[in-house]
Amino acid sequence: MSPLYRMACILPLAFALLGGLPAASWAANGKAAGKKPVQPVAEQFVDGIVAVVDRQVITLAQLDVKARQVQQQMRMQGIPVPPPEALRRQVLQQMINAVLLDQEAKRAGIRVTEAQVDQAVQSVAQRNRINPERLRQEVQATGMRWDDYRAELRNQLQDEMLRQRFVQEHIFISDRDVNAFLQAHADMPLILPQTEPEPEPEPMPAPPPPKPSGPELFEVAQILVEVPDYASQDTVDEKRRQIDALLKKVRSGADFAGVAAASSDGPQALEGGNMGVRPLKDWPDLFAKTIANLPPGGVSGVIQSGRGFHILKVLQRGWAEPPAPPKQVRKAPAPKPTPPKTAEPGPIMVTQTHARHILLKTSQVVTDDMARQTLEGLRTRIQHGESFEELARRYSEDASAPQGGDLGWLSPGETAPGFEQAMDALKDGEVSEPVRSPFGWHLIQVVERQSKDMEGEYRRMQARDELLQRRIGPAYEDWIDQLRSQAYIDNRLDKPRRAQD
């Protein structure tokens, strides 16, 4: 299995509950044998507090533990470890973001259950073609404790729920956007929505190497120097001088990953700036134009976006290979995606479902149990003759409430996997038990079903999804920036550096 394909597999963890799960990014726990630990800086923090995020504190002891974990992970990945001060600063930024996300999840009532973590573990094991016990052994072989791995999966499930609730739900892609995309990509092959993996065929003699097929994949890293909103021209000029100095350092032979780890403001700094693997068309337009003609190992000049100044490096580019079991686990193992099916031109007949739903969102006040019990009560009332539509108008917190919860005709792949699975199990007219999704708790009613040629609709769905993938990353980072701007953050580790500046 090529390294490029392995990285592509780590990106979108196709998890049955959420439909996506980011790859594990925190480091393994434990002490690296023979490695010098990060030295504490207790003399600067007599009270042992390095940051306050609203009312929650981050202690020096917590920071040093996390810094040692990240240091070990970086060494395992071959990423140069920055000096202790720079490492702590980068790690603390990640910890501050994690606290903000935890706080937002609590306010929204988002909670990841043990059953969901178990399901994620099972999904990772299945897609790596190993059983959960073997997965556990491979994780522990990296030095990561199993409890820490499960905690990491829990955090990422939570982050994905937040991403879907507060970011993806608010990205608007108009019909005009879709029409323009389809016009610009008229030769784009139609890829059918993924279903359950097909059983593997019986072993056969190895065929000749296949010709490259599908979109070319680009693994890209960045160094980012952020420019604050409404920055003065002097500040912009200073940030430009910073990025120019970093570019000069890289072009003079410094390790790109090491420079990113020490100096980048990007969220992937401690992963050497690695932003993962995507087809060219899925990178933001500015990035796609910059990397299109760069060879593997090629480094761009400075480019400017609304976020600041960037330097990009193409780590690898090439085509995916068929999935194969990993020989070793460097990071938390990720499920391998089922190779997409490309449809031949012509009718594509699918079964559509006309459905209604009642959605109750969880919050700090409305817990999972409260939402589920309320829906169970509504389901009983419907079974005793009350109108689903009237109850949806009164109780549903979805935009479809004024229409009695009517979702219209739904095609496969248009809803969250858990929602779709529950809906598909219903007979016409039947009402589901309460169903959980990243958006809250639902009651679902199937009105009727029909068979329809979906070639045109699938092409539009594919275009809409690709536009969404381009926009969701920058939108998620902007949302986290918004959380930071609205929170009280006292970063005491950063104060000495600012005083020197």
Image (spheres, rainbow, N blue to C red):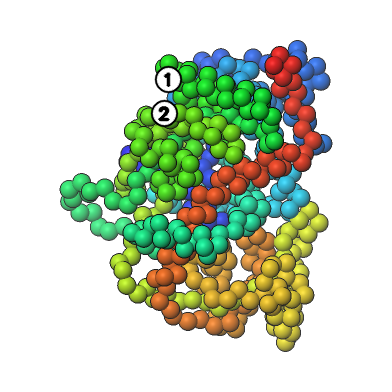
In the image, what residue occupies the spot 49% across and 29% down? Answer: 302
Decide if residue 176 is in sight here: yes
Residue placed under numbered mark 2 in the picture = 299
Q: Position of residue 52 (x, y in %)?
A: 78, 31
Q: Position of residue 396 (x, y in %)?
A: 72, 70
Residue 422: which quarter of the image? bottom right
The residue closer to the viewer here, 483 or 341, is: 483
Secondary structure state at the residue bearing disc 1:
helix
Secondary structure state at the residue bearing disc 2:
strand
Farthest residue to the front: give it. Answer: 233
- Which kind of residue does numbered mark 1 sit on? Arg
The residue closer to the viewer here, 491 or 243, is: 243
In the image, what residue occupies the spot 42% across and 41% down? Answer: 289
- Which kind of residue does numbered mark 2 sit on? Val
Residue placed under numbered mark 1 in the picture = 251
Q: Distance between the residues labelled 2 and 1?
A: 8 Å
Q: Please, is residue 380 above or below residue 43 in the view?
A: below
Q: Position of residue 245 (x, y in %)?
A: 53, 19
Residues at discs 2 and 1 in contact (Cβ within 8 Å): yes
Q: Please, is residue 461 above or below residue 137 in the view?
A: below
Q: Position of residue 322 (x, y in %)?
A: 31, 49
